[in-house]
Amino acid sequence: MIETLDELDRRILEHLQHDASITNQELAERVHASPPTCMRRVRRLVDSGIIQKQVAIVDPAKIANTLTALLEITLDVQSAESLQQFEQAVAQEDAILQCYRVSSGPDFVLIAQVVDMPAYHALVHRAFTAQANVRNVRTFFSIHRSKFDTRSALG
């Protein structure tokens, strides 16, 4: 179900997307609302699924042995069932961080992180080569990440 957000919801989400570790009191002060109102609003945003989860974001550049791959995947058959089966299969792969169904070009764009090239090859074999419906895999390896943000547009 798609919800309509009012201005207070948007302010709350903007602040939480920037730093979800702030206290409810700090959040209330920043969005100019009472703490109980903020608590109710945040609880509603969580219960409705708008806020999916709160996580710690790790910078892969600060960790040795991290390889980020951007993959374009083209399927042989693009039926609704085939697309859904592929999405379910990649959802089981921990190395695949994001999966987007796209138009005009490949069927999917994925972002994956692995520890090294052998791990990448194992992922490709397990998730794509072994899949009868995968026609093409095209991979780009990140050499530098100049921007990364997790915020959603709330416009």
Image (cartoon, rainbow, N blue to C red):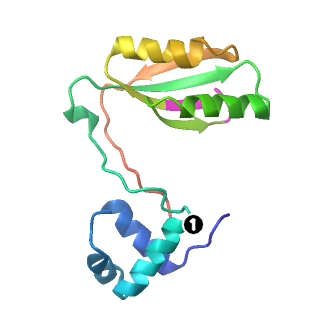
Tell whether position 108 is magenta.
Answer: yes
Main SS of the magenta part reads: loop
* Residue 136 place in picture, x, y as percent: 62, 15
* Residue 40 place in picture, x, y as percent: 46, 80
First to last magenta residue range: 103-110
Graded by Cα atoms within 10 Å as few (under 14), some (14 to 19) or many (20 or more), the crowding at tag 1 reads few
Q: Residue at x 53, y 31 (%)?
A: 92
Give the mark count: 1
Residue 75, above or below 13:
above
Q: Residue at x 53, y 15 (%)?
A: 126
Q: Residue at x 32, y 17 (%)?
A: 116
* Residue 13 place in picture, x, y as percent: 43, 68
Residue 73, above or below 14:
above
SS at mark 1 in the image? loop
Q: Residue at x 65, y 17 (%)?
A: 134
**In the image: residue 153, left or right of residue 101:** left
- Label 1 amino acid? Ser
Tell whether position 84 is magenta.
Answer: no
Question: Quadrant location of residue 32?
Answer: bottom left
The residue tagged 1 is 48
Residue 12, above or below 34:
above
Residue 122, above or below 75:
above
